[in-house]
Image (cartoon, rainbow, N blue to C red):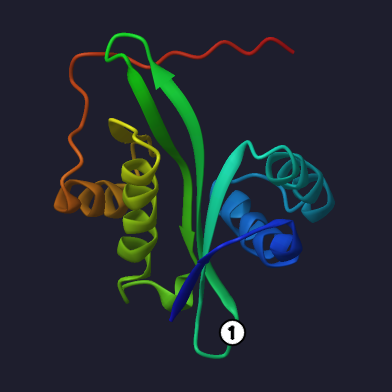
Amino acid sequence: MNIKQISIEDLDDLVVLFDQYMVFYKKPSAPDKYREYLNGRLRNAEATVFIAYCLENEPVGFVLNYHSFSSVSLGKVVLLNDLFVVSSHRKQGIANSLIDCSITLAKNTGSIRVDLGTAKNNFSAQALYEKIGFVKDTEYFSYGLAVN
């Protein structure tokens, strides 16, 4: 397995994985729509993405990180927003390796922490995050408001 930070030239590999990720989260398959969105994130340097490739150079997983800030903590934060490994390659340590990329990214950018969220019923992801050392927030609730 090989992991690399991708650029716009690797967009096709990312779109294939991202489409599968969205279907996993019960969203429609829409590669063209996702390509447009991801293209913007990469072209505008709004996200840092790592892709894992198997020995056949096939993309098998990705992690997409956004950069943010915490006013309360007075520091930069890496938001591990999306993590996905294709089902045929799970339980091989790929997710751990991709998360390590996010942690290293945080350290290299002077960030104070890595934040992430997952579905309440995604128990395997929760177990993985807690095994690595992520702590479930019990102090704050997360809210969202759709504006369109």
Nearer the observer, 119 or 17: 17
Residue 124 drawn at (x, y percent): 28, 55
Residue 6 x %, y %: 61, 60
Q: Quadrant of the N terminus?
A: bottom left
Q: Sort mark 1 into few (<14), some (14-19) or many (20+) by Cα contacts within 10 Å.
A: few
Percent position (x, y) of residue 79?
43, 35
Q: Residue at x 69, y 40 (%)?
A: 41
The residue labelled by disc 1 is 57
Going by the numbered disc 1, the residue's amino acid type is: Asn
Q: Secondary structure at mark 1?
A: loop
Q: Position of residue 60 (x, y in %)?
A: 53, 72
Residue sitting at 32 percent across and 48 percent down? 103
**Along the viewing direction, whichever of 45 and 33 lies nearer the viewer:** 45
Q: How many marks?
A: 1
For this rendering, which residue is in front, 90 or 132?
A: 132
Looking at the image, residue 50 sits to the left or right of residue 11; the answer is left
- Residue 136, picture quadrant: top left
On screen, 137 above or below 91? above
